[in-house]
Image (cartoon, helix red, strand yellow):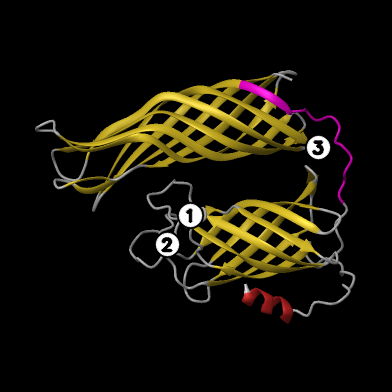
C-alpha cells in the first residue's frame, strides 16, 4: 500500500485538474499501480511465490458501447514482478459505471499470457498449467476531479481446471489513473429493430461430447471417449439496449466415466461421475435477431473414483462425494419466433478430483474434462 501512495505522489497530482488533451491512438486512460503478488486466502486459496510487490500498468481505450448503466471499453495491461516471480500481460473487455460523485466500479474478463511455471517442478513457484489463462478482474475507486483517480484493483488468473495443474494466482493493490482525453460521447438512444431476449426461458439440447479422464502419479494415463450429450437448461435474462446479462442452470444427467490401466500392470483406475450440473452467469450482445454470448460458473457432480487390483478384485482405495469444478462456454442464439430461440454453443466442464493412496499404488490424482458441442431450442416465457 505504501508503495502505491509513493507512486501516486510522484506523479504530481494537480490541485485542480487540467483539461484532458485529445486522445492518442484511442487511449482514454492510463493507470499505474503497486499490487501485492500472490495473495493467500482469496480465490486461489493459498500463496507460494515470495516476492511481494508487483507493478501494474494499464491503458484503457475509449468506450464503444453503453449497457446496464455503464460503458464497455477494451483494456491492455501488464503486471510485472521485479523480484523474478510470475509476470503477465493481459487483454480485457471492461464494463465500468460511475456515480455523479466520481465513485466508479468496474468488472473485466479477458485473457492473460504469463512467464511463470506450468508444472510443479519448482516448489517456490505456482504451477499454472497453461501459458494462456483466464483473467477476471474487479476495481472500485474514486475519480475525484473528473480526470485523476485512485482505486483498489484485483485480478485472478487460472485455467479453469482445463489442465493437470491449476493453482491459480490472485493479485490486489492500489492504482492511480489519469484520463488522457475527454469522456467519449456515448450513444444512449435505445436501439430499434433488435430482438428482446429479456425474461425467463427453458429449453433442451443435444450434441456431441468428448470426455477425457486423466490419472496422474509419477506417470500418467488417459482415457478419451466420444459420445452423445443431452439435457436441459433454464435461466433468466436482463437486457439493456444491446447488452444482455443473465443467470442459467443446466443439467447433463448422463453417466460419465471410464476405467483405464494405471500405475503398474494389473491395477485399474475407475472414475464415475453421475451427471454434470452447472450454474453460470451469461453475458452477451444482440445483433439484430441474434444473441452472441459467453458464459462461466461452477459445475457439480456426484464423483466416485477407485483403484482396483484386477487379479484379486480388491479395492485398493476409493473416494466419493459431491465434487465441484468450473464451467465455461460461448455460443449464439437466434430468435426464430417471438417465443422460440435456436441456439448453438460449445461448453467445457473441468473438475479436479481427490487423491487416492495405498501402499501398492502410492498417491494417484484424477481429473475429468468434458467438452460438448450442442444445439438446442429455448422457449421464452415472456
First along the sequence among labels 2 and 3: 2
Magenta stretch secondary structure, dominant? loop
- Give 319 or 225, whichever is nearer the viewer: 319
Badge 2: residue crowd in 10 Å (few <14, some 14–19, many ≥20): many
The dot on residue 292 is none
Chain part drawn in magenta = 186-202
Residue at 85% from the left image edge and 56% from the top image edge: 184
Image quadrant in which you'd find residue 360: top left
Please identify the quarter of the rendering in which residue 123 is found. Answer: bottom left
* SS at mark 3 in the image: loop
Q: Which secondary structure lies at badge 1?
A: loop
Tell me: 228 left or right of 263: right
Q: Position of residue 87 (x, y in %)?
A: 52, 67
Residue that badge 3 annotates = 241
**Cα gap from disc 1 to disc 3, whole angstroms:** 35 Å
Residue under label 2, please give it: 126
For marks 2 and 3, give the one nearer the viewer: 2
Measure how far apart labels 2 and 3 are at the Cα level. 42 Å
Q: Residues within 10 Å of mark 3 (few under 14, many from 20)?
A: some
Residue in the foreground of this view, choosing between 317 and 83: 317
- Any magenta on residue 60? no
Earlier in the chain: of badge 1 and badge 2, it is 1
Q: Which residue is mark 1?
A: 44
Do callouts 1 and 2 mark residues in contact (Cβ within 8 Å)? Answer: yes
Amino acid at each position: 500500500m505504501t508503495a502505491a501512495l509513493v507512486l501516486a505522489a510522484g506523479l504530481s497530482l494537480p490541485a485542480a485538474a487540467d483539461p484532458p488533451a485529445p486522445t492518442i491512438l484511442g487511449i482514454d486512460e492510463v493507470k499505474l499501480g503497486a499490487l501485492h503478488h500472490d495473495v493467500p486466502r482469496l480465490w486461489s486459496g493459498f500463496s507460494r511465490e515470495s516476492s511481494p510487490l508487483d507493478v501494474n500498468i494499464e491503458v484503457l481505450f475509449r468506450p464503444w458501447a453503453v449497457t446496464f448503466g455503464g460503458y464497455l471499453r477494451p483494456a491492455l495491461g501488464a503486471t510485472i514482478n521485479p523480484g523474478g516471480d510470475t509476470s503477465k500481460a493481459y487483454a480485457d473487455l471492461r464494463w465500468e459505471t460511475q456515480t455523479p460523485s466520481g465513485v466508479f466500479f468496474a468488472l473485466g474478463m479477458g485473457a492473460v499470457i504469463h512467464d511463470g511455471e506450468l508444472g510443479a517442478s519448482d516448489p517456490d513457484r505456482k504451477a499454472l498449467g497453461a501459458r494462456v489463462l483466464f483473467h477476471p478482474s474487479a476495481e472500485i475507486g474514486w475519480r475525484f476531479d473528473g480526470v485523476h483517480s485512485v482505486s483498489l484493483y484485483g485480478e485472478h488468473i487460472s485455467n479453469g481446471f482445463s489442465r493437470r495443474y491449476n493453482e491459480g494466482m490472485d493479485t490486489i493493490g492500489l492504482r492511480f489513473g489519469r484520463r488522457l482525453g475527454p469522456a467519449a460521447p456515448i450513444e444512449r438512444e435505445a436501439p430499434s429493430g433488435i430482438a428482446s431476449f429479456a425474461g425467463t426461458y427453458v429449453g433442451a439440447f443435444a450434441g456431441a461430447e468428448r470426455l477425457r479422464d486423466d490419472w496422474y502419479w509419477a506417470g500418467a494415463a488417459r482415457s478419451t471417449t466420444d459420445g452423445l450429450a443431452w439435457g436441459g437448461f433454464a435461466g433468466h435474462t436482463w437486457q439493456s439496449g444491446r447488452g444482455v446479462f443473465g443467470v442459467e442452470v443446466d443439467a447433463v444427467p448422463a453417466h460419465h466415466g471410464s476405467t483405464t490401466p494405471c500405475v503398474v500392470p494389473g491395477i485399474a483406475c475407475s472414475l464415475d461421475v453421475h451427471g454434470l450440473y452447472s450454474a453460470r452467469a451469461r453475458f452477451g450482445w444482440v445483433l439484430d435477431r441474434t444473441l452472441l454470448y459467453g458464459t462461466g460458473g461452477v459445475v457439480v457432480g456426484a464423483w466416485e473414483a477407485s483403484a482396483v487390483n484386477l487379479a484379486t478384485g480388491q479395492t485398493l482405495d476409493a473416494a466419493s462425494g459431491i465434487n465441484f469444478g468450473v464451467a465455461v462456454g460461448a455460443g449464439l442464439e437466434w430468435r426464430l419466433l417471438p417465443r422460440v430461440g435456436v441456439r448453438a454453443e460449445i461448453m467445457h466442464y473441468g473438475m479436479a478430483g481427490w487423491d487416492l493412496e495405498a501402499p501398492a499404488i502410492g498417491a494417484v490424482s484424477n481429473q475429468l474434462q468434458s467438452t460438448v458441442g450442442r444445439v438446442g431450442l429455448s422457449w421464452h416465457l415472456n
